[in-house]
Image (cartoon, helix red, strand yellow):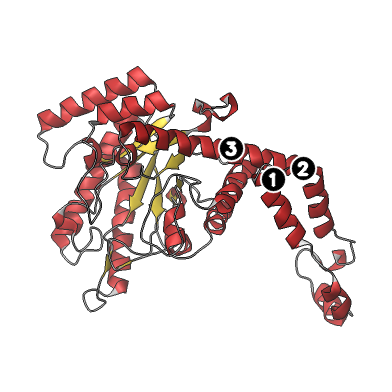
């Protein structure tokens, strides 16, 4: 592989324990890979050149582990981090896997489940802080319904809000310094999941007691499941100052959650996403929440992980070329040319400006006749990505 496309720590490429540790089980098939311990996964990630490793609480420590077992696992995990130099930028809690969460965690109709979920998160926050995590992600995989007869959505939102408000106060009280990142998904494993898109999450955050502490963790596959443009969701989050974390993978539109290798399917969408992140100067982790194909052994899993990082860096280089391509930039300048004729109407409202604007004689036909050259521009992008330019 070309050295310029090799991962370095400054790229901040991370993977979850559950990603490279996936054993290849699916709803129709049994596992195809033996389970790896957290220590083995850390060393695998160190071998392929990752920067960090993220985890759900029970990826690291089984839900029924004794305190002695948990202490031993955590000690060994820390030793593996020291040996490999990997860091833990993000932690999250599994509030969807255990049968107790069959009707949700924070939004369950059972107050005992909701309270247990708070306890589980607080314990995970403690462990994450010990490991150095500064972002804490909430994916509400079971926070939804199959039938609206079972739960009033207003009750669901109220319960979710109360849980996050409680945990924000706990975060402040403990001095952990976490930034909370909410992750949207339209469905699966529930028939419908509350707050199904990044935009919905951003609206919800504004209703919290500490909105400054809470942002989003948009995932490419989840927005594509809803048939949406992931770049637009990320741009909205960035514009709101809420892009606290990001999950990169790939996905066919309007399918089940496929979690493919980044850049495996949608080249153009992935390219413009990388270009956006690099152009705006995003400083967070580039987290690959994806899985190797079920066809692979662990050598194939390493190929998968290396491929995610390599593809990101290829798109990063293509973004640099796009920004320096004279023909593309000249065309963009022409498309966005401003003759200054509208300057008098720019800026803040004034009565005089509004009155002048109401009387201004626009030549609609002349404006409409102008070709915008988007076909040519898009083909230049295609040529660039295909290596013709």
Q: Position of residue 100 (x, y in %)?
A: 14, 56
Q: Residue furthest top?
A: 83
Q: Which residue is mark 1?
A: 384
| Front residue (pair 389, 112) | 389
- The structure residue drawn at horizontal position 53% and vertical position 39%, both measured from the top left corner, is 311
- Per the rendering, the mark at residue 208 is none
Q: Position of residue 382 (x, y in %)?
A: 67, 51
Mark found first going from the N terminus, 1 or 2: 2
In the picture, measured across the screen, residue 25 lies left or right of residue 346, that is left
In the picture, measured across the screen, residue 132 lies left or right of residue 367, that is left
Q: CA distance from mark 1 to mark 3?
A: 12 Å
Q: Which residue is mark 2?
A: 325
Please, is residue 104 above or below residue 116 in the view? below
- The structure residue drawn at horizontal position 34% and vertical position 19%, both measured from the top left corner, is 82
Q: Which residue is mark 3?
A: 314
Q: Position of residue 22 (x, y in %)?
A: 28, 41
Callout 1 touching callout 2 (CB < 8 Å)? yes
Callout 3 touching callout 2 (CB < 8 Å)? no
Q: Secondary structure at mark 1?
A: helix
Callout 1 touching callout 3 (CB < 8 Å)? no
- The structure residue drawn at horizontal position 16% and vertical position 25%, both measured from the top left corner, is 72
| Front residue (pair 260, 86) | 260
Image quadrant assignment for residue 344: bottom right
């Amino acid at each position: 592989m070309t050295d310029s496309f090799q991962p370095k720590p400054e790229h901040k490429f991370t993977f979850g324990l559950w990603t490279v540790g996936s054993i290849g089980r699916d709803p129709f098939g049994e596992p195809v890979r033996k389970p790896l311990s957290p220590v083995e996964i850390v060393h695998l990630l160190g071998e392929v050149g990752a920067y960090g490793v993220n985890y759900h609480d029970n990826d690291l420590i089984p839900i029924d582990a004794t305190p002695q077992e948990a202490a031993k696992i955590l000690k060994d995990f820390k030793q593996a981090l020291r040996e490999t130099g990997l860091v833990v930028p993000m932690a999250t809690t599994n509030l969807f896997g255990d049968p107790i969460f069959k009707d949700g965690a924070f939004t369950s109709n059972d107050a005992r489940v909701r309270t247990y979920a708070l306890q589980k998160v607080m314990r995970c926050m403690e462990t994450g802080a010990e490991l150095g995590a500064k972002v804490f992600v909430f994916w509400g995989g079971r926070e939804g319904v199959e039938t609206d007869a079972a739960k009033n959505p207003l009750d669901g939102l109220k319960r979710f809000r109360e849980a996050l408000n409680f945990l924000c106060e706990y975060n402040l009280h403990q001095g952990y310094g976490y930034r909370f990142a909410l992750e949207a998904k339209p469905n699966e494993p529930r028939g419908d999941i509350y707050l199904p898109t990044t935009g919905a999450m951003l609206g919800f955050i504004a209703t919290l007691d500490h909105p400054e502490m809470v942002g989003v963790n948009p995932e490419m596959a989840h927005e594509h499941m809803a048939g949406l443009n992931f770049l637009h969701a990320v741009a909205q989050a960035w514009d709101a100052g809420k892009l606290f974390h990001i999950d990169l993978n790939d996905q066919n539109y309007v399918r089940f959650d496929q979690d493919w290798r980044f850049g495996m399917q949608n080249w153009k969408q992935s390219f413009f996403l990388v270009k956006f992140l690099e152009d705006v100067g995003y400083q967070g982790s580039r987290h690959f929440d994806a899985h190797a194909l079920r066809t692979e052994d662990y050598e194939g899993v390493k190929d998968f992980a290396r491929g995610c990082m390599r593809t990101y860096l290829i798109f990063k280089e293509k973004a640099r070329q796009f920004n320096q391509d004279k023909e593309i930039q000249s065309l963009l300048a022409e498309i966005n040319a401003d003759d200054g004729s509208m300057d008098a109407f720019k800026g803040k409202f004034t009565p005089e400006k509004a009155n002048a604007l109401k009387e201004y004689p626009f030549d609609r036909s002349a404006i409409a006749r102008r070709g915008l050259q988007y076909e040519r521009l898009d083909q230049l992008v295609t040529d660039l990505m295909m290596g013709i330019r």
